[in-house]
Amino acid sequence: MLSEIKHRYDNSVLFSHDAELNSVKITLLLALKLSANIQWANLRRADLRGADFRGAKIRNADLDFSDMRGAYLQGADLGFSDTRGADFRGADLRWATLGNKKLIGERPFFQIGPIGSRNEYMQVLISANGVQLNAGCFYGSIEQFERLLDAKHGSNNHGEEYRAALVLIRKHVELWTPAIEEVKDA
């Protein structure tokens, strides 16, 4: 049986191999082991639980709603990849690049949800360039999100829920953002 990884936009085959089992995870791991170029890969809804992607370069991939629970992504480069809805519970994201940011610290990724008016997950990235939020179609700083929140939701239920989440997010950032010296040593 031929197992393939295809381009996320033009559906061209980026990597293929003959396998007894058609498994995206096995095919992806083999492609990485062989240093295949799998940028722009369509990995949407893929089951990638527990996979070891240490130092892998999977830039610009569609990881939307993929299952990355328990995956080992330390130092991996997922820059500019679409990770909306991806499940990173228990994944090791230390020093990984995610959403075009180099993540820093022991707990650089934080997710809350489903939450808000779109009933989606709110994701927090702690990077060397600051804290970024991804909530629905919003991607930006906490301050930018608060300005948008006031304009869009005011004090309705969604606005109150988001504000409560921001209190938790700020505490998480305070507890888990490494000191500048630690970032320079990494």
Image (cartoon, rainbow, N blue to C red):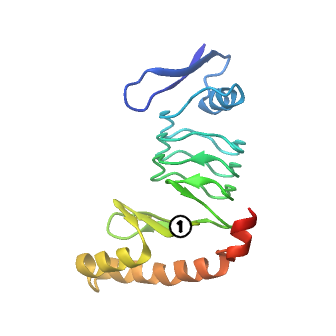
Q: Residue at x 29, y 86 (%)?
A: 155
The residue nearer to you, when weighing 6 against 76, is 76
In the depicted structure, whether residue 54 falls above or below residue 135: above
- The quadrant of the rendering that contains the N terminus is top right
The residue nearer to you, when weighing 69 against 129, is 129
Image point (53%, 77%), residue name:
169
Query: Residue 35: where, in percent of width, then height?
Result: 67, 28
Kind of residue at disc 1: Asn
| Name of the residue lying farthest toward the left | 151
The quarter of the picture where residue 182 lies is: bottom right
Q: Nearer the viewer, residue 134 or 157?
A: 134
The quadrant of the image that shows the C terminus is bottom right
Q: How many marks?
A: 1
Q: Is residue 68 above or below residue 105?
A: above
Image location (x, y in percent) of residue 74: 70, 52
Q: Along the horizontal axis of the image, is 163 left or right of 180?
A: left
Graded by Cα atoms within 10 Å as few (under 14), some (14 to 19) or many (20 or more), the crowding at tag 1 reads few
Residue at image mark 1: 129
Q: In the rendered view, tell whether residue 91 sits above or below residue 181.
A: above
- Residue at 64% x, 54% y is 96
* Residue 109 versus residue 53 in the image, above or below: below
Q: Tag 1, which secondary structure? A: loop
